[in-house]
Image (cartoon, grey):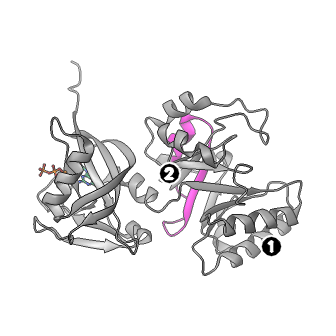
Amino acid sequence: MSAVPKKEIRVAAGVIEDAAGRILIAQRSAEADQGGLWEFPGGKIEPGETPFDALRRELMEEIGIAVDGAEPMLVVRHAYPRQRVILEIFRVRKFSGEARGCLGQPIRWVGADDLVDFRFPAANRFIVAAARLPFHYPIVDDVAGDLSAMRRHFRRLVAGGFSLIQLRAKTLERAVYRSFAQECIDCCAGSNVRLILNAEPELAVELGAAGVHLTSARLNSLSSRPLDNKFWVAASCHDAGELEKAESLRLDFAVFGPVLPTRSHPASAPLGWERFSECLQAVNLPVYALGGLAAEHLVRARSAGAWGIAGIRGFSGS
Ligand SMILES: Nc1nc2c([nH]c(=O)n2[C@@H]2O[C@H](COP(=O)(O)OP(=O)(O)OP(=O)(O)O)[C@@H](O)[C@H]2O)c(=O)[nH]1
Ligand SMILES: [Mg+2]
């Protein structure tokens, strides 16, 4: 007997942001599917509606605001035990009216970093992580062990407004990496820049970094997420299996590539955009495209399903 295919529903929902950057969440009623959990307001797309039409209608019905402008943010595909959902998520920054729970549901405006303290439906992990992530993830790498070139690169990135930076220095001696990492972390204190160390998770904790970036070897050796939700945990992935592993360990994001030929890894065969996009189909995790990319590849990468782009040389920050 063949299995009955699961019902599939298409939903439009909004990550609504106020002028202070806070995000609106609403609590689902106890009787609803996923009752009691928090959600981004929205609802089912009706026949003949575009996702944007549905978003406008739902946000007026549920929280009484008129959407004046919204950007497509991401698409989440998730299979619940009883149904599959396709969530078309928009970022809504332009709206009029004061948000209220029109159906009697509690609502709250929360800082993006506080979203992790609320319980959401399983499909929302991707959205909650992405709401806190910029589109660019530059990497400071060792340039033949030249510490002053690395320092200049790091400072240019900070001055250039990049807010999520990876420090990856494979050839530096451990003690040198450590003291340079500490210097960069101190430099980020009091700013919105989050420094992610490509090192052992313990070192990130000890030095007070914002998180850790796992090499694919480290990712493959783990059986659970190495640090709690207060830290970012990301990983480098090179195939669909590693992306799946990153998702199953509940990491916050992944870097996937190389997409195009690169100078830093000339021996690795590039994936190309088509293959890159195929591998992302089944993944619910923000993914940064890496490999031979510069800041201007962002639109191409996002249309292939990436959240953003990562890179070493493409992001001089100048
Ligand atoms: N609105 C919304 N729905 C979500 C989110 N995450 C998530 O998995 N869903 C799923 O999307 C599905 C549809 O959403 P919904 O219940 O809001 O639909 P609706 O407003 O049209 O409600 P109705 O069926 O009572 O008319 C639910 O099964 C819900 O679990 C989210 O963040 N926001
Ligand atoms: Mg709804």
Which residue is outermost to the top? Answer: 1
Q: Residue at x 38, y 70 (%)?
A: 117
Vertical arrangement, residue 266 with respect to residue 64, above or below: above
Magenta residues (range): 225-246
Q: Which residue is mark 1?
A: 179
- Indicate the quadrant containing the C terminus: top left, top right, bottom left or bottom right: bottom right
Q: Which residue is mark 2?
A: 249
Q: Estimate the spatial distance between the alpha carbons at disc 1 and disc 2, rounded to whole Å.
A: 30 Å
Q: Nearer the viewer, residue 156 or 227?
A: 156
Q: Residue at x 36, y 44 (%)?
A: 76
Expressed as whole percent of the image width and height from the top left, the position of residue 8 reads 23, 35
Q: Of circles 1 and 2, which is in front?
A: 1
**Chain-order first, disc 1 or disc 2:** 1
What type is the residue that disc 2 sits on?
Answer: Leu
Residue 199 in view (yes/no): no
> In the picture provided, is 310 more to the left or to the right than 68?
right
Residue 113 part of the magenta-drawn span: no
Badge 2 density bin: few <14, some 14–19, many ≥20, Cα 10 Å: some
Secondary structure type for disc 2: loop
Q: Residue at x 66, y 43 (%)?
A: 293
Q: Residue at x 31, y 45 (%)?
A: 88
Residue 29: name its quadrant.
Answer: bottom left
> In the picture provided, is 91 more to the left or to the right than 158?
left
Q: Nearer the viewer, residue 206 or 191?
A: 191
